[in-house]
Amino acid sequence: MPEAWPRLRREEIAGFRSRAYCDIARDILARFAEDNFSVDELTEDIEAAYATFDCPEIVPLVALGHERYLLELFHGPTLAFKDVALQLMAHLFARSLKRRGARATIVVATSGDTGGAAVEAFGGMTGVELFVLHPAGRVSEMQRRQMTTSPHANIHNIAIRGTFDEAQAIVKGLFADRELVDGLRLASVNSINLVRILIQSVYYFSAAAALPSAPVFVVPTGNFGDVFAGEVATRMGLPVQRLIVATNANDIMVRTLNDGVYAAGRAVSTLSPAMDIQVASNFERALFEAADRDGDFVRRNLSPSKDNHELQLPPAVLGRLQARYAANCATDGETVGSIRRFKEETGRTIDPHTAVAAAAAIKYGGAAGTPVVILSTAHPAKFPEAIERALGAKPALPERLSELLALPEKVVEMDAKLPLVRAFIEARLAHHES
Ligand SMILES: *Cc1c(COP(=O)(O)O)cnc(C)c1O
C-alpha cells in the first residue's frame, strides 16, 4: 500500500470528461510511476496496451435509460476485464526487466479470467516464465482453453485439485518464503499486486467524469480487487455515492459488510466461476484503511497462516466500511433470472458475473437521481451454458474464442500442495535454463 494516496483536484477530475481514456490513465498512473517510468514511457506503454482493445473508447459507458449505465470492461483480447490491467502490466514488466537485464518468474492463481489474460499478455515475452494455477474443473471451458492452448514455451499451466482459495493460498505461501522469492525472482500479477488495482482505478474516474452527478458503482466481486480499485479512486478524490459489492452464493463479503462477521467457509461452484472465492485477498486492504491503517490489527486478524478465518469487526471499523460499501448476493437462480430480465428490458445479453451485479443493483434500489453504473466484467460468450439456461440459446462465439476449440491443450494436474507446485516450478525453470 502507498504511504499516502495522491489527491486529484476537483477541476482536474471534471476535466477528464473531455479526455481520451489513455490520457486519463496516464495522468492518474504517472502519480505512482514517477520513480520507475517517465511520462513518455508510460504513455507509450498505455497506448500499446490498449491498442489491443476492439473499440476506440477502450471501456465504453453504455446508457441504459432510467439513470442506469453499463461500464463494458471486456473489450480486450480475452474478453474479460482482467485485460485492462494485465495488458498494461505486461508492457511495464517488459520495460522494467529489459532495463535491468533481469528475468522473472510470474506465478498467478486464477478463478478463471486472470489466467487467460496473463497468458495473452505474457506469452512469448523474453525473460519471463509464467505459471498459472487454476482450480481443476471449476473454470468454464472457454476460460480453460484460453490458458491451456497457448503456443508459447514460457507458459506453464497447473490444474489444482481444489478450489481457487487453495490455489491462491499456495501462491501466497510461495511468496511468504523470501529466499524462494529472491532465488526464483518471483513476481505476482494477481491483485495481490497493487499495480493491478491502480490501473483499474482509472475506469472509475473515466465513467464518473462522464456522468452528471456522483454515481453508485455496482461491482461483481470475488477477490475484492475491482471494488477496492473503486475505493482507491475515492481516496484520490473521486466523488462516489456508494460501492455495491455484488457476490454469488460465495457471500462471505456480504455477511461481513452487513453483520460484521468475517467467517470463511469452503467456496462452492456457481454459474459465475470467476467469483467463486471465499478468502477475498483485497479485503485486507479495505480493512487496513477502515482500521486507520493499523497493520497490526489486520495481521492479527487475517494472517494468511491462520486456517480458520473468523473475525468480529469492531463497530467503528464496520461503520467506516458501511459508509463506503453496501453488499448483496444472488443465487444461481437469481443470476439466470437477471440475465433474462436484462435482455427483456434492454435488449442486451450480459454474462453471469455482470448479471449478479445487475441483480444487486435492483436489490440496492438507491435514491432517485443517482446514476447507477454496473461494471460489466466479461463477454457473455465466455459462459455459453449460463446464457443458454437463461435465454434458451447459446450466444454467438466471437472469432477470438471459436479459434480455441481446435487447438491442443497443455496442462498438468496436481494436488493442492505447496511442495508439489514448488517442485514443478523449480524443475521447469531448471529445464528452461539448461
Ligand atoms: C475476476 C472477475 C471478477 C471478480 O473481480 P475481483 O477483482 O476478483 O473482485 C468478476 N467478474 C469477472 C468476469 C472476473 O473475471
Image (spheres, helix red, strand yellow):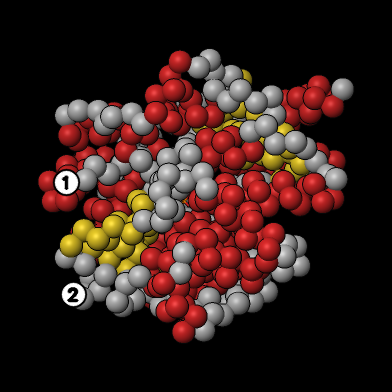
- In the rendered image, residue 124, in percent from the top left (x then y), is placed at 67, 32
Residue at numbered disc 2: 368
What kind of residue is marked 1?
A: Gly
Q: CA distance from mark 2 to mark 1?
A: 23 Å
* 313 lies left or right of 271: right
Residue at 69% across, 24% down: 153
Is residue 262 among what the camera can see?
A: no
At mark 2, the secondary structure is loop
Q: Residues within 10 Å of mark 1 (few under 14, many from 20)?
A: few
Q: Secondary structure at mark 1?
A: loop
Residue for point 43% across, 31% down: 400
Is any atom of residue 60 visible in this view? yes
Residue density around tag 2, few if under 14, some if 14–19, many if 20 or more, within 10 Å: few
User: As drawn, is 296 to the left or to the right of 349?
Assistant: right
Residue at 56% across, 36% down: 120
Mark closest to the chain's N terminus, 2 or 1: 1
Q: Give residue 84's position: percent from left, percent from top.
A: 50, 51
Q: Quadrant of residue 422?
A: top right
Judge: label 1 CB < 8 Å from ligand 1: no
What residue did someone put label 1 on? 347
Q: Is residue 19 left or right of residue 429?
A: left
